[in-house]
Image (spheres, rainbow, N blue to C red):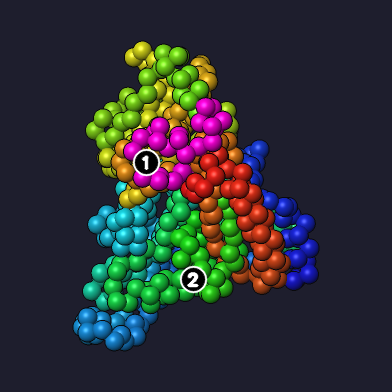
Amino acid sequence: MAAASAAAVFSYCKPSPFVGQFPSNFGKSVSPQIEISTQSYRITALFWGSKKSVKHQPVDSSLGDFTLTGSATQEAKENQARGNKVSVSIISSILEVSPHDWDSCTLDATGPEKFNPFLTHAFLSSLEETGCAVKETGWMPSHVVAKDESENILGVVPLYLKSHSYGEFVFDHSWADAYYSFGARYYPKFQCCVPFTPVTGPRILIRNTPFKDQVFDILVSSLMGLTAKSQVSSLHITFPSKDEWYKLKDKGFLQRMGMQYHWKNRNYKSFDEFLMDMKQSKRKNIRQERKKIPAQNLTMKRLRGYEIKANHWDSFYKFYRNTTDNKWGSPYLTRDFFHEMGSKMGDEVLLVVAEKGEELVAGALNLIGGDAIYGRLWGCHPQAYYPSLHFEACYYQAIEAAIELNLSTVEAGAQGEHKIQRGYLPVPTYSCHYFMDEGFKKALEEFLVRESNQVGVVMKLLHESGPFKEGIHQ
C-alpha cells in the first residue's frame, strides 16, 4: 500500500498547487448519502465507488470523558475541586450552543485585539440557517464541544463533514484523485474551518482557564478519535493560527503552507501618505485608476450597520450572482444569507457601494475585526462595465477605511498577483492535515515539504520586487 500511495501522490501532486484554480465542475450538486441524529452518527457511502471495502461505523454523539490533571495555581486547585472532568461531544448545529457561550470561546481564543468576526456564532449560524453550510450542500455541521461537570462550555471547534472540496481555498482535488487511484475513498472527510472563508484565525476555540492547554489537547485528541471511529479518510484544519499550526505538527498532522496578499498600515494618516511610500510608477498608476471613478460619474460610499438597508443586500446579491455566474458557475451563498448576516452582525459589516446617479451598480463586502478589515466578495451590475471600479471598491476603499479606523491590516481574500502593485504583499497562510492511511501520509509529507519551499521562494521574490520604495518594509 505504501508504494501505491507514493506513486499515486507523486503522480497527481503537481508543482505549485497553492495557485490552483477552481475546477470546471465547480458548484455542481452532489447528493451525499449521510445519516445523522442527535444520538448517533453514521457515515455511509458518498459518490465514488471504492475499490476497497469500507465499513463505516456509527459514532455516538459523545466523544468521551477526560480527566484534567492538577495545576500549581490556587485558582486551578479550586476549579479542580469543583470538578475535573471534561466531556466532549459532537453536535449537528451551532444553534445547540448559545451565542454567548460560543462567542466567549471565540473571544478568549483570539483576544479582543485580534477579534475575528468569521468565528462568531452570528456568522456561522447565518450560514447554517440560510442553507449555505448544511448537509444538502455537502457541508454537514459536526461541531465539537467540550464541557465541564457543571455543563460550562470550555471549548468549541467549528467542524464539518464534507462530501467534496469546494469552498475551502486550500486545494486538495489532486489528493482526492490520488487517493482514489489506489482504491480508497477520499470523501467523506472532516473539515475544520469557516466555510467559504480563507481567513486565518484560531480553529480550536478555548476559554481562558488554567486548564486551557489541556482542553486544547483533549479537543485535538477527540478530533483525531472521531476521524478514526468514523472511518473517513482524513481531517483537515484550514487557515489555523500559526501557533496552532506548530502545535498540530506535534500531534501528527501534516503541515501545508500557502500565501495571500495583505495590506499593512504603517500608521498612515491618509491615503496620500500611504501612496508616498510607493515607488513613483506604482503611485502614478493608482492615482490614474482612482481618477477614473469620478470621470465615469460614479460615487463611492462606505456603509455600516443600520446604514445598510434591505435594498442594498438585494442589489448586492445580484452583483454577487453576476460574479459567480461568470467566474465560478454556481454560488455558495443565498440571498437570505446576506440579510441574516447583516442583521446579526451590525457594525462589523462594511459594505462598499458604487452609485451612478441613484442606482447601485457595484458593491464589495467587508467584515471588520479587532485589528483588520477582511475583504470578502465583490460584484457589479451585469449590464455594465466600469474600468478600475473593482480596484477602487475592493482595495482602495478598504485601505481608506483601515486608515480611518486605525486598523493594522486589510486582508483582501485569496490569490490575485494584481494586488501587489496596489500595495498588498504576500503573507503565509497555513493548514494542517491528518490522514488515516500511513502510506499516503508519508508520500504526501514529502510533497508538502517541496511545496512549502516553493511558496517561500515565491514570497521572497515578490517582496524583493515589491511596489514600495527601498527601505519601506510592509
Q: Secondary structure at mark 1?
A: loop
Q: Does 435 lie within the magenta span? A: no
Identify residue type, mark 2. Lys
49 w.r.t. 144: above or below: above
**Distance between mark 2 and mark 1 Cα atoms:** 35 Å
Dot 1 alpha-carbon crowd within 10 angstroms: few under 14, some 14 to 19, many 20 or more: some
Foreground pick, 271 / 376: 271
Q: Are marks 2 and 1 in contact (CB under 8 Å)?
A: no
Residue on which disc 1 sits? 268
Please, what secondary structure does the residue beneath circle 2 have? helix
Residue drawn at x 45%, y 14% as measured from the top left: 295
Residue span colored magenta: 262-285
| Residue 85 horizontal/vertical position (percent) | 31, 80
Q: Which residue is mark 2?
A: 247
Q: Quadrant of the N terminus?
A: bottom right
Residue 427: percent from the left, percent from the top? 53, 51
Residue 452: tell me if it is visible: yes
In the foreground, 458 or 13: 458
Give, as a three-letter code, the residue at label 1: Tyr
